[in-house]
Amino acid sequence: MGRRLDQQRVDDVQHMVHGAMEKAMQASGLRTARGLAQTLNEHGYAVSERTVTGWRNRESGIPAWALVAFGQITGLGVDSLLGSNDVAGLVARVAEHDRVIGEMQATLIAVCEKVGVPWRPAPRQARDLDRASELG
């Protein structure tokens, strides 16, 4: 279960980085992998068109140095390119993760009940449940 959530986080970050590259290309008026590769090379970053094509096709991950380079090329901050200041988007992702965790927890409780094993919340969750009952 933990591995699945960790992979989701990795996928979210990769999606954000890919979006940052596309934003950088749009802001710079670049339409092709060749154009982005040439621009990166002009700024001192040795990269081939084939590498950029791999990034664009999601065949390979985009390295951190490229993200920094995108910020330098566009004059936009890395946070802006990543959309990190998109609070609504972040809140939506957290809500989706909470929903998935809730579904997984409900499934776990049902399985525990079916096999006769008592379900006990994790210590942190137990504290949160206690606090919630005190407030409610």
Image (spheres, rainbow, N blue to C red):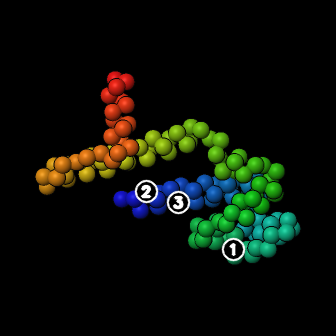
Which three-letter amino acid code belongs to the residue tagged 1? Answer: Thr
Task: Please tell me which residue lies in front, 34 or 18.
Answer: 18
Q: Earlier in the sequence, mark 1 or mark 3?
A: 3
Viewed as shown, does residue 47 lie left or right of 127? right
The answer to whether residue 26 shows anywhere in this view is no
Q: Residues within 10 Å of mark 2 (few under 14, many from 20)?
A: few
Task: Say which residue appears at 43% left-offset and 56% top-offset.
Answer: 5
Marks 2 & 3, CB-CB < 8 Å contact: no
Looking at the rendering, which quadrant does residue 70 occupy?
A: bottom right
Instruction: Identify the residue under disc 3.
Output: 10
Q: CA distance from mark 2 to mark 3?
A: 9 Å
- The residue under label 2 is 5
Q: Residue at x 16, y 52 (%)?
A: 117
Observer-nearest of 36 and 90 = 90
Q: Amino acid at mark 2?
A: Leu
**Vertical side of 83 occupied by 17: above or below:** below
Q: Quadrant of residue 3?
A: bottom left
Q: Quadrant of the C terminus?
A: top left
Q: Secondary structure at mark 1?
A: helix
Q: Report the mark closest to the observer, 2 or 1.
A: 2
Q: The residue under label 3 is which amino acid type?
A: Val
Front residue of this view, candidates 48 and 80: 80
Q: CA distance from mark 2 to mark 1?
A: 29 Å
Q: Point out the tag, 2 or 3, that comes first from the N-terminus.
A: 2
Residue 29 spot, x, y in % from top left:
79, 55
Check residue 51 in the rendering and tell me which mark sits there, or answer none.
Answer: 1
